[in-house]
Amino acid sequence: MEKIQSNITLKPIEAFVITLFLLGGISSAIIFAGVVPHIPIVLAIMCLIGFGLYKKISIKELEDGLTSGAKTGLGAVFIFFFIGMLISSWMASGTIPTFIYMALDVVNGKFFYAIAFAVSSIIGLSIGSSLTTAATIGVAFMSVSSALGLSEALTAGAVISGAFFGDKMSPLSDTTNLASMIVKVDLFDHIRNMALTTIPAFIISFFLFAIFSPGEAAANFSNLVLLKETLVKEEYVHWYSLAPFLILAYLAIKKVSAITTLSASILSALLISFFVQKNFGLEKMMNLLYFGFKSDTGVQEVDSLLTRGGMESMMFSISLVLLALSMGGLLFKLGILPALLEGMKKYLNSVPALITSTAGTAIGINFLLGEQYLSILLTGNAYQESYDKASLHPRNLSRVLEDAGTVINPLVPWGVCGVFLTGVLGVETINYLPFTFFCLLSPILTVIYGMTGFTITKK
């Protein structure tokens, strides 16, 4: 968006008031009215167009701002389509079900919180969705925790921490793809760089959960046993189903482009699906890629876990990306974002200040709007030029967007994730918040790295 030229020059205070008005309206609609973020963003775009016309900017110039902003997200759109197909093909080939089975196989009463954290991490990494992980395996862990007489808040903290580790690091995650594409960084380069803050946060969190865990416990693990038995009964678990993952991992290590890597993994998964699925023909394969995989085992927990993927499932994220980027294009065209950055320049004269300010902005948008997608989109757009002028590689920005954007939303009581997790896990956000060690550590570590210059890369 740095190529979009502003038609007018605003004072920083004017830009601040306009931004506060827009974000306040969007946040009120999302938090208090409970609407999806698309509608208030469209209304915000209308307000910006009205402001532009008031400033005597032609409608053609304003439309150019909209389309120029949307164009910057076309790369993300293509990746999202491929991710949707990858998820559905991995479900059909048994790749994700096999990972889930392997994870559940290690669950027992000993070191319960640490295991719940690790298993949720693996499953979150496998399916790329924190909320789905929490709503399925997370609910199972809450039931076991209740049977063991353990802390529900700690269990919820372990599940959420693991689920958001997986969401953050999975190439299947929409937020991970969004953060990499918004600043034009290769997906797997972004993940590798993000591991430098994420892995230490994971290790520290694991040890903290191990310390809090009971040494030994006994309980009825019928819920988890049922999941495992159903996966085996439906013949979803096979050693060769891991091949698509191994292909993905190999090509990612070799730094092959994301679309080529995803395509190879999708094709291999579709081939394996002919051996795993019954009556898997060409028509079913085509429908699978668009509509996603539909599980019909009769076990609600399994069906909820496995019914995922497809190009259609990505439409929510794609439409939100395009609308938010279009709004960002208008914010540049009207000189609002340039004016804000100009006003902040005196505070962004060093790398530590830039990293800290980026993290603070992402966290602030999460609390103000209650929406993690917008915390990534708006922060990424606002700081790209500043990172460029500081000669910092864009992957520094994409990492901060996830460290302080993706993992913060579950800690916001009125946030989309916070509300959802409280509903499905039955624990108030304020109660589990102190135990979401991974989510709390991620922004702290990214700020520390920024202050010390550790792993901060130049262009």
Image (spheres, rainbow, N blue to C red):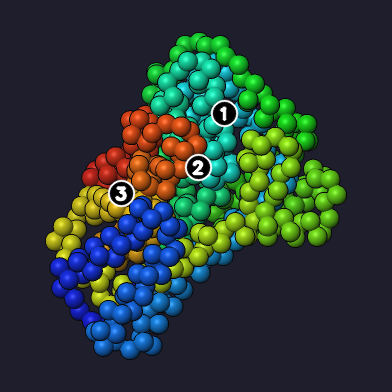
Nearer to us of marks 2 and 1 is: 1
Q: Which mark is residue 140?
A: 1
- Crowd class of label 1 (few under 14; some 14 to 19; many from 20; radius 10 Å): some
The residue under label 2 is which amino acid type?
Ser
Q: Is residue 374 above or below residue 300?
A: below
Nearer to the camera, 193 or 203: 203
Q: CA distance from mark 3 to mark 1?
A: 29 Å
* Tags 2 and 1 touching, CB below 8 Å: no
Which one is earlier in the sequence, the residue at label 2 or at label 1? 2
Q: Quadrant of the C terminus?
A: bottom left
In the figure, is residue 72 to the left or right of 5? right
In the figure, is residue 369 to the left or right of 96? left
Q: CA distance from mark 2 to mark 1?
A: 15 Å
**Residue under circle 3?**
367
Q: Is residue 243 visible?
A: no
* Tags 3 and 2 touching, CB below 8 Å: no
Q: Quadrant of the N terminus?
A: bottom left
Task: Classify mark 1: helix, strand or loop.
Answer: helix
* Residue at (45% x, 58% y) in the render: 36
Quarter of the image holding residue 218? top right
The residue under label 3 is which amino acid type?
Phe
Q: Is residue 11 above or below residue 64?
A: above
Nearer to the camera, 23 or 402: 23
Q: Which mark is residue 130?
A: 2
Task: Classify mark 3: helix, strand or loop.
Answer: helix
* Residue at (67% x, 40% y) in the render: 303
Quarter of the image holding residue 132? top right
Q: Residue furthest right?
A: 279
Q: CA distance from mark 3 to mark 2?
A: 19 Å
Nearer to us of marks 3 and 2 is: 3
The residue under label 1 is which amino acid type?
Ala
